[in-house]
Image: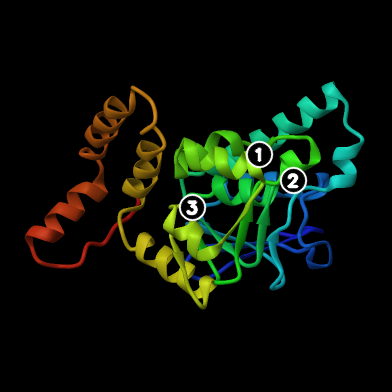
């Protein structure tokens, strides 16, 4: 895929690396970046070659340092609502991806950058990573889903502390509070290792596990889990996986 603000590369294992490529602007999210992210994840959803996604930012200073403040400064009530809703929709499409998506956070993940990382299924950080939602300092609030996702990830009290103070959280504290899965020296390598392990399992099961987990915060979650479990029992992958276990061999999953 060819983009102006992103790079999009798929390796032989089916892991697609999407890199926000505006290092001179600390990978800030402007309209063009958001539109290209939307298109890229549409391609991810329909491509049979893509099995998993690694999302990161170019350079060592930032994953995404935030939104384009110049664009935000010109918004009124109507256009502000529209911008927020568009960002929410794009980030929701990332969360709704039924292929595992890991954010590799190097440097700053602030404002929209933190919200983008939270829309991914998992987050792996370098020691230099810094997270924050500083919008109150601009007289605003997070608008791309941050007020909704952060409480689910770290709890309401910690989410309110971060959002109301605008405080920045360094990598180790982010790991301790559950905002990132791990802090490692080579996060890209670790993310690929994690995704390779995930892809060794039944692909239909992986897709449905993601779907089930994202129903865990509503009352229908248990029913969704039971329905998906029942459906999976009829798949070729489930029959292959259980047979391979009983026969003491490695399963050969076909994604069916």
The CA distance from mark 2 to mark 1 is 7 Å
The CA distance from mark 2 to mark 3 is 23 Å
Q: Is residue 50 above or below residue 226?
A: below
Q: Earlier in the sequence, mark 1 or mark 3?
A: 1
Q: Is disc 3 placed on a helix, strand or loop?
A: loop
Q: Residue at x 26, y 39 (%)?
A: 232
Q: Earlier in the sequence, mark 2 or mark 3?
A: 2
Q: What is the number of the mark on residue 193? A: none
Q: Where in the figure is residue 107, as x and y percent of width and height?
A: 65, 66
Q: What is the number of the mark on residue 34? A: 2
Residue indicated by mark 3:
179
Along the line of sight, the residue nearer the viewer: 192 or 85: 85
- In the rendered structure, the answer to whether residue 216 lies left or right of residue 239 reads right
- Examine the image and state in which quarter residue 103 appears: bottom right
Q: Is residue 256 visible?
A: no
Q: Earlier in the sequence, mark 2 or mark 1?
A: 2
Residue indicated by mark 1:
90
Q: Where in the figure is residue 41, as x and y percent of width and height?
A: 62, 47
Q: Residue at x 75, y 64 (%)?
A: 21
């Amino acid at each position: 895929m060819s983009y102006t603000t992103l790079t999009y590369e798929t390796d032989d294992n089916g892991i697609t690396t999407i890199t926000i490529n505006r290092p001179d602007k600390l990978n800030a999210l402007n309209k063009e970046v958001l539109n290209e992210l939307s298109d890229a994840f549409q391609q991810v959803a329909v491509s049979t070659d893509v099995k998993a996604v690694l999302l990161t930012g170019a350079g060592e200073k930032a994953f995404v340092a935030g939104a384009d403040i110049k664009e935000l400064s010109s918004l009124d009530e109507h256009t502000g609502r529209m911008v927020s809703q568009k960002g929410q929709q794009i980030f929701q499409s990332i969360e709704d991806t039924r292929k595992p998506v890991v954010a590799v956070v190097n440097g700053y993940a602030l404002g929209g950058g933190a919200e983008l990382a939270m829309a991914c299924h998992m987050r792996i950080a370098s020691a230099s990573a810094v997270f924050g939602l500083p919008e109150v300092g601009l007289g605003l609030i997070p608008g791309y889903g941050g007020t909704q996702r952060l409480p689910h990830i770290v709890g309401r009290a910690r989410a309110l502390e971060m959002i109301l103070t605008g405080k920045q959280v360094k990598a180790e504290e982010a790991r301790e509070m559950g905002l990132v899965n791990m802090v490692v020296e080579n996060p890209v390598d670790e993310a690929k290792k994690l995704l390779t392990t995930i892809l060794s399992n039944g692909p239909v099961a992986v897709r449905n596990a993601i779907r089930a987990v994202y129903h865990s915060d509503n009352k229908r979650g248990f029913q969704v889990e039971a329905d998906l479990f029942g459906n999976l029992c009829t798949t070729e992958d489930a029959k292959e996986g259980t047979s391979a276990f009983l026969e003491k061999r490695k399963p050969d999953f076909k994604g069916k």
